[in-house]
Amino acid sequence: MDRTQGQVDPAEPSSGPARVVTLTAGDFTLTVNPVDGSEIEPLRPGAERARPRRRDAAGRAARDTAARPPVLPGAPASARLTPAREEERARLVRLLSHGRSVRLTGPSGSGRSGLLDAVAADCAGVAPDGVVRLSGYGQQQPAELLHALYAAVYEAPDERPLRPDREELLARVREIGAVVLLDDLEMGGAALDELLRATPECAYLLAATPDTKAPSDASHLEEVFLGGLGRAESVEFLEAGVGRALTEEETAWAGDLRFASEGLPLRFVQAAALLRQRDELNGTRGGDEDEEPGVFEERPRDAAFVPLPTLAEGAAPAELLASRVSESARAVLRIACALGGELPHHAHLPALVGDTHADAAVAELLGCGLLTPVGTRYRLASGVARQLEEVGYGDPAAEEARTAARHYAWWTGHASVTPERVAAEADAVLAALAGADVVAAVLLARTAAPAFAASLHWEAWERVLRSGAEAARKAGEVAEQAYFHHELGVLALCEGRLERARAELEASIGLKGALADKRGTVAGRRALALVTDREAAGAAAVSPPLRLAPPVGGAVALAAPGPVAALGPAVPVAATGPTVPVALAAPVGPRASEAVTAVVPARRDAPANLAEVFAEPFPMSLKPSPAPALAPPVAARPVVGSRKRTVLLAAAGALTVAALGTVVALAVGSGDEETTPAGPGPKVSSTTPDVPAAGTDTAGEPGGNDSAGDPADPAGSGSGAVTEAEPGATPGEGAVAPTPGVSRGAGAKPSGGGTPSRKPPVVPPKTSPVASPPTTSTSPSSSPSASVTPTATPTPTTSVSAPTATGTGTGT
């Protein structure tokens, strides 16, 4: 470890200056300063990053020893596998030797960790990089596991901490060939697939519980499930734990316990502890009277007979076991309950408990089955914390957590404590931080954060910083809050999260500006400048600047200033629209690195009008029409359709005009009294319904009302007669009734013949009934036209033939 200040011997406590650690993180040089905050700067020009080297066999052995739980005082407990576990052990070793990855699934307390220890001893020489032990407890993402694997195989050549960026990390771990034993796996699915893809040369043995997320089908993992012990195996396992043969009553009790616990080995470890405590209380174990007093001298030694535990006590034995252990062990259990099940290192227990023999309590609790190893530490076994909290062990949790937080705040800030030792105690430190009050939490986070940063345990570093920022906000410590936000910004910058880095650094600069902290503000602005540079470099690498071509000679193009040269011919925009030349241009000059954006032509098959839309699903002709030829560029291009389509459209318009004229005529004829406007045109007035006489032929005039008379007045006189004004007459004078028998001139044309006349119904005369209905003939009207032009002096004439004897009338 490179320390520029405060380099002391770890065995000699010192209160010298704070430790300043310099490390390499990707392309940055990070200086961790516990006093003023971390400083980050890019690597100096010309400085090459040191290439890490692989650890040798001795280095791997030392690393594996450091990854194991600490050695407890006293005689080590011998671990022995049952015959069923020996078969599973041989199967796992065979699969790993062939390069297959295995997922070992079993409930908590099924003996997964003990089986992994046995497999590790058999696979020591299988892979070139040996066996790597990792812990997945609390790891939901594969990044930290990859960094842990990298640190287990590689080491920095100059003893300077090195944390590679993601590209270098993936390149290094891809070359690792090792048997990786990953205990307490807590991830699956895509995250597990990412871990397996990043290390194709490694064979994994993944130990997980059944409730862990299952791997995907693409992972190709072998599944091995750990079941419970059989009846004979459970009795044999229990006898090995007690150290004697079982009686018939105890054998029957063990059978019932196996049925209730589904044969979990952890339950039989706890049952063996219950039987040993019962033998000690009953005085049946030899040598107890000669035992020297020590940690357990307060244990009662009466001659009272203690019966076998009940089946309920055997299934949940934490309360009964805790009541028979020493007082120091019970104090350790209270601390573990306050820390959420995490147990501090046994070296911290005398200071936390206040008993010099508290370190021996860990071995006592481990022998009772109340503790289980997790990575490099111990924690309460599955279900023990819940059982102890129900009987009151969690009542002083707040006070115990506050005591642990103050103790760790002093210990992590001591100059003799290395960052690696702080990283090994990360879970207990984080648990104490979560349960402490805001004042103790701010102090602990302030001292532990630099140690986690220097140890490269950056997941714990981020968790401590976030907890410290929240505690500082609640406590009103603005200066400490600014420090935590600055560190979070530096961490995000090192990991490439630029948006998060900018947000955290801007918050820190604002808080430091409110405090008039000039030095801190300058450090924050320097880090923020690095964020801006990285954002600019990333934007330039991802999206180069666009150079759009200007129009050339009337061509439609997106323009940029400067001379251009056309690179492509004219492209028609649409098949029915005008052809527009599109110029693909680039600036003339040495700007070869600038990109050129081409204009994509429009679709050629787009319809131009509604007729073309309906022409495709409803073709007018079965013969395919030839493809239209491309016309030269013009301002506008008329749409050319077929002759039939044009005629049909004109006929449809004429019919529409005729229908509108009929409606207008009906509306005019239904009025009680209508008068045409004054002027040179004819004036027609009518006061009776328009009912023609029998045998008459009536031609409608535009703007008038044609009537031949009333059936009661055949002569056409009276109120039903039609009066016509003479040309040039003034309104109200010169009205003359038409005379029957007067024919229209041969050359006369109806004025305004654009509107077809309405044909009135034929009514037979009352005076001369005939056998057959009268026949009415009308002259054909002129063809309808699109426009109607009234004449200046119309001269309408009518021709009405008198009824003949046969009742027919003719008109010319």
Image (cartoon, rainbow, N blue to C red):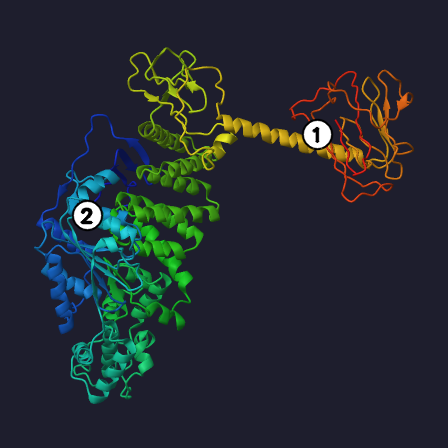
The residue that disc 1 covers is 756
Q: What kind of element bears circle 2?
A: loop
Residue 649 visible in the current orientation = yes
Q: Quadrant of the C terminus?
A: top right
Q: Residue 473 location, x and y as percent?
A: 46, 46
Q: Residue 148 location, x and y as percent?
A: 22, 49
Task: Say whether residue 757 is left or right of residue 316.
Answer: right
Disc nearest the viewer among 2 and 1: 1
What residue is drawn where x is 18% and y is 65%?
A: 114
Callout 1 crowding tier (Cα within 10 Å): few <14, some 14–19, many ≥20: many
Callout 2 crowding tier (Cα within 10 Å): few <14, some 14–19, many ≥20: many
Using the rendered view, name the quadrant where residue 271 is placed. bottom left
Amino acid on which the number 1 mark rests in the picture: Pro
The residue that disc 2 covers is 199
Above or below: residue 776 compared with residue 551: below
Above or below: residue 608 compared with residue 176: above
Q: Residue 76 location, x and y as percent?
A: 16, 67
Residue 2 visible in the current orientation = no
Q: What kind of element bears circle 1?
A: loop
